[in-house]
Image: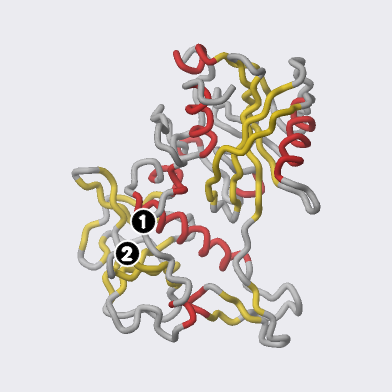
Amino acid sequence: MSVPAGGSTPADNPVPVRTAEWPTSATSTPDAVPVLSRAAHDRGHLARALADPAQGRPVRVLTVDDQRSVPVHEGTDGPELVYDERPAMPTGAIYLGEAEGVHYAAVRGQRALTVSGRPVDHWAGLRELGADLGDLDAGLLAQAVGIVEWHERNRFSPVSGAATTIERAGWVQRDPETGTEVFPRTDPAVIMLVHDGGDRCVLGRQAVWPAGRFSILAGFVEPGESAEGAVAREVAEEVGIAVTDVRYVTSQPWPFPQSLMLGYVARALDEELRIDHDEIEEARWFSRDELRSGAGPQALPPGVSIARHIIDRWVTGEFS
């Protein structure tokens, strides 16, 4: 697989990402977990089985448009999602859970200038917003985008081909002919920083990325393969080196459309890079000092991504 755009491959981005949509901030990620791994709500999995998961109480509904953007208000402390305040769970909404007694849901819809009488400053997506949202909004947005993507891509049963019916507050699709239940899927992918055991790491880039942007290597886990095995295979395929000391770091959901990025570090057994140009355009060794000082790539992955999180932790000397 190709080096991910912060953790995804071209297949994960059916709508091409324009250069203008890439965050250009140099914000680092000093927190203990990647940005999109944050959550401050209970997903309420038991409530999904109820006819009304909100049990008659008001619901804050997040509208997700066809570009996976949502309404945003620029508050004094940063961006905030703008929710549609509804007296009850709307028909067709997907239940997201609750936080501090407040229920949340998501719907697919169109952009508007106001939501529930509140002005919308702009519409934006996870790439632009994720690093700046609070824990509650970040967790709800990642969940909403992921589940909406699943619905958009899985409208028919994989068993019979029949159009599915939606059950359990949007978390199950049922085949009406066979009765088979279809659940949301998550595709495991590995994303890994390869280092030399000293002060250098390998970064690569795709030709479709903005000029000068480099990231760590990544790819999908194949059937019958462990995550650690995928790390070794992908590194060998993309840059032609063998690795050892493969160590898990952390994970992050990347709902473009349905990946779970499993983050690793690994030590290279040799230094000569033999690049597969069908996979990536360029790969190079960079030193900690180059990355720390800004003398390396023109741009690193945005702060919203697990790629940036792992790079920042390596630069501090956490991994060796």
Left or right, 184 with reference to 294: right
Q: Quadrant of the N terminus?
A: top right
Could you say where residue 176 lies in the image, as x and y percent from the top left? Answer: 66, 86
Q: Amino acid at mark 2?
A: Ala
Earlier residue among tags 2 and 1: 1
Verify CB contact (< 8 Å) between mark 2 and mark 1: yes
Q: Quadrant of the C terminus?
A: top right
Distance from disc 2 to disc 1, alpha carbons, whole Å, reads 7 Å
Name the element at disc 1: loop
Q: Nearer the viewer, residue 68 or 256?
A: 256
**Which residue is drawn at the image coordinates 79% and 53% (left, top)?**
223
**Which residue is drawn at the image coordinates 32% and 48% (left, top)?**
134
According to the picture, the residue beneath numbered tag 1 turns out to be 40
Badge 1: how crowded within 10 Å, few (<14), some, or many (20+)?
some
Q: Amino acid at mark 1?
A: Ala
Q: Nearer the viewer, residue 229 or 62?
A: 229
**Which residue is drawn at the image coordinates 58% and 64% (left, top)?**
150
According to the picture, the residue beneath numbered tag 2 turns out to be 99
